[in-house]
């Protein structure tokens, strides 16, 4: 994340200043969205050097390399999509048709479709092809102001193809001006060659694939799918123990289709986040509160598989568990590449407030990735990742469906 060539003339205090803006800082020391009217942001060396009322920024002649008049527009932190399976090959529109004809997601999976069909497609694709297919999805997110994205593996399910996925994910961060965080999701499904040998795949994961991925520095975190159709809590616990021994933080797909007490399990390992959580109960919520685990809410998957059980939003709110909101962009349960629409779904389907939605794709999403000290709010010292919007009030970011009011996206001050 090193900023390239800072363009400030020698002696000027700031490289760039955005003035005449309304700021939703998400500063946790301020109430709500942390609003500042008539605000300004000044940047130096890619980081925020000043954020606050414009009147308190005394700017002498030549003290800023460039001054940009925002004409009263709103500035939020750059958006963060903290849960995606963006790197995948092909699509599963055929399974969508099966489900429209009455099959459930689990039935499709058990019939050999589901994740395994995406595994076949990914294994057959070159790294180059993966990039070509994934870039349009990434570009759609970037066009809405996304400056940080998390990308999981989990459609390779062997050493070579998991590594290929994560290398492609990292490469996307070089091809576009976006920060990529990767998660190793080798425990997503049983690969077909281990269909009758669960223990065999688990040892391969723990003894070979995970250490290789860690040694190559390909993963920032380790994730798993804890579900009847995927991995049991005991299996996940073994994997998480190995991950922690390698110094990698963990996160978990928990309680999406049933309550296997995944939230509790994630909390027991001090997970950064537990994600989905439709079936999480009060005990799970309390455990997450105690461990500081972020709840990642994924309304796209809930909507797309026509789930009816909603995550316990009121319990998270009462307990003070931070809630993030993400697309879960994946070919099976959430072919969604709009974080703005995701916010609308979180509000409409789950009753999140505007403040919760906006915080969910900024401050809390950063926390879910363990990078809350670097991005996610407009505070001095953080990277200058900004989204500038042509809107009159923040609610417009949540209210619209299929309209993009982004005016400009700034990453590391550029
Ligand atoms: N939960 C999901 O919703 C996705 N993965 C997961 O663990 C589904 C992935 C897929 O169906 O391809
Ligand atoms: Fe997911």
Image (spheres, grey):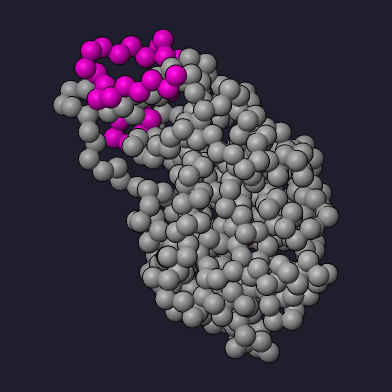
Q: Position of residue 308 (x, y in %)?
A: 83, 55
Q: Where is residue 2 in the image (x, y as percent from the top left)?
A: 30, 45
What residue span does the magenta drawing correspond to?
44-71
**In magenta stretch: residue 315:** no
Q: Is residue 302 left or right of residue 129?
A: right
Looking at the image, which residue is at 35% across and 56% down? Answer: 175
347 vs 200: above or below: above
Looking at the image, which residue is at 65% across and 59% down? Answer: 334
Between 190 and 328, the one lying in front of the other is 328
Between 147 and 238, the one lying in front of the other is 147
Q: Position of residue 163 (x, y in %)?
A: 44, 72
Quadrant where the C terminus sits is top left
Q: Where is residue 131 in the image (x, y as percent from the top left)?
A: 42, 65
**In magenta stretch: residue 55:** yes
Q: In this view, does 357 lie to the left or right of 177?
A: right
Q: How many marks?
A: 0
**Is residue 103 something one can see in this rendering?**
yes
Looking at the image, which residue is at 49% across and 41% down? Answer: 145
**Is residue 261 something one can see in this rendering?**
no
160 vs 251: above or below: below
Q: Is residue 36 left or right of residue 313?
A: left
Looking at the image, which residue is at 42% across and 76% down? Answer: 126
């Amino acid at each position: 994340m090193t900023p390239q060539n800072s363009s400030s003339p020698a002696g000027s205090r700031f490289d760039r200043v955005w003035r005449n803006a309304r700021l939703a800082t998400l500063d946790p020391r301020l109430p709500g969205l942390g609003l500042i009217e008539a605000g300004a942001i000044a940047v130096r060396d890619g980081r925020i050097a000043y954020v606050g009322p414009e009147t308190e920024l005394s700017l002498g002649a030549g003290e800023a390399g460039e001054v940009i008049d925002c004409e009263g527009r709103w500035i939020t932190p750059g958006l963060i999509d903290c849960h995606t399976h963006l790197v995948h090959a092909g699509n599963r529109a055929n399974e969508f048709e099966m489900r429209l004809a009455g099959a459930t997601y689990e039935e499709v999976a058990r019939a050999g479709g589901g994740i395994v069909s995406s595994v076949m497609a990914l294994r057959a694709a070159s790294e180059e092809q993966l990039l070509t297919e994934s870039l349009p999805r990434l570009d759609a997110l970037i066009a809405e102001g996304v400056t940080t994205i998390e990308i999981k593996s989990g459609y390779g399910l062997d050493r070579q193809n998991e590594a290929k996925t994560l290398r492609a994910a990292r490469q996307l961060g070089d091809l576009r001006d976006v920060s990529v965080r990767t998660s190793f999701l080798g425990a997503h499904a049983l690969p077909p060659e281990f269909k009758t040998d669960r223990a065999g795949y688990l040892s391969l994961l723990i003894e070979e694939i995970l250490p290789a991925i860690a040694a190559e520095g390909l993963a920032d975190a380790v994730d798993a799918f804890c579900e009847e159709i995927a991995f049991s809590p005991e299996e996940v616990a073994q994997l998480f123990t190995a991950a922690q021994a390698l110094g990698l933080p963990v996160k978990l797909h928990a309680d999406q289709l049933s309550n296997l007490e995944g939230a509790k399990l994630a909390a027991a390992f001090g997970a950064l986040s537990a994600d989905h959580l439709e079936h999480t109960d009060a005990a799970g919520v309390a455990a997450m509160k105690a461990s500081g685990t972020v709840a990642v809410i994924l309304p796209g998957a809930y909507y797309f598989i026509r789930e009816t059980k909603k995550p316990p939003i009121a319990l998270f709110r009462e307990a003070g568990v931070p809630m993030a909101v993400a697309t879960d962009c994946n070919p099976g349960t959430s072919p969604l590449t709009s974080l703005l629409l995701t916010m609308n779904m979180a509000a409409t389907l789950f009753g999140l407030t505007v403040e919760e939605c906006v915080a969910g794709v900024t401050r809390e999403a950063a926390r879910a990735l363990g990078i809350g000290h670097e991005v996610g709010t407009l505070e001095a010292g953080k990277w200058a990742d900004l989204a500038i919007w042509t809107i009159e009030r923040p609610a417009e970011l949540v209210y619209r469906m299929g309209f993009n009011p982004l005016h400009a996206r700034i990453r590391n001050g550029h």
